[in-house]
Amino acid sequence: MNDMNILDYLPEKQVFLDVQMKNKEEVLRFIAEASVKNGIVQDGDFLFMGMKKREETMSTGVGMGIGIPHTTSKEANDAAILLIRLSNPIDFQSLDGQPVDIAIALVIPESNTSLHLRLLARVTRLCRNKEFLKALRRAVDPSELCSKIRKLEEKIVNYN
């Protein structure tokens, strides 16, 4: 499906730049709390446990400094993406052994597994784009980053 854009699920208020965290658990807790604050879910603890359980199955640290923590939620009405750029890289038990400085979290309605898989594939492919990674690491504010992502997605129309 070529009409899916990351920004359909990633509003500026869900972009957090240069956040100080010590470990993966803090990142997952931050995602859960931000999800409650932004009205994505009501039960942050349940979301946190879902992400934590997913990490215990296999790390979502995909390499190149990127983590893609994700889980489903029966409370989520639609998919949501949260993007967190960490002020200092942390150990995420990544596949390549490298620390993570970018976490792109996905919260997906429990009932929509096809959307879950499509969004995960879309984000993963986008993370392989050097321009995208450069934009993530250099953006000054959420507005600038979302603008760069929009331009990149227009340029790379057919990458899913």
Image (spheres, rainbow, N blue to C red):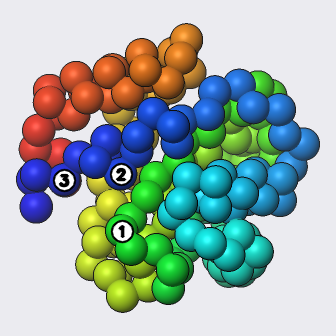
Query: What's the CA distance linking mark 1 and mark 3?
Result: 13 Å
Of marks 3 and 2, which one's residue comes earlier in the chain? 3
Percent x, y for residue 151?
A: 22, 23
Of marks 2 and 1, which one's residue comes earlier in the chain? 2
Query: In which image quadrant can residue 137 be found?
Result: top right
Q: Is disc 2 placed on a helix, strand or loop?
A: loop
Is residue 99 visible in the rendered image? The answer is yes
Circle 2/circle 1 CB separation < 8 Å: yes
> What mark, if any, has residue 9 been given in the picture?
2
Q: Is disc 1 placed on a helix, strand or loop?
A: loop
Is residue 62 visible in the rendered image? The answer is no
Query: What's the CA distance linking mark 3 and mark 2?
Result: 9 Å
Judge from the rendering whether residue 65 lies leftward or rightward of residue 121; answer left or right.
right
Q: Rate crowding at label 2 as few (under 14), some (14 to 19) or many (20 or more) other CA atoms within 10 Å.
A: some
Q: Which residue is mark 1?
A: 78
Q: Is disc 3 placed on a helix, strand or loop?
A: loop
Percent x, y for residue 39?
A: 53, 60
Of marks 1 and 3, which one's residue comes earlier in the chain? 3
Q: Which residue is mark 3?
A: 4
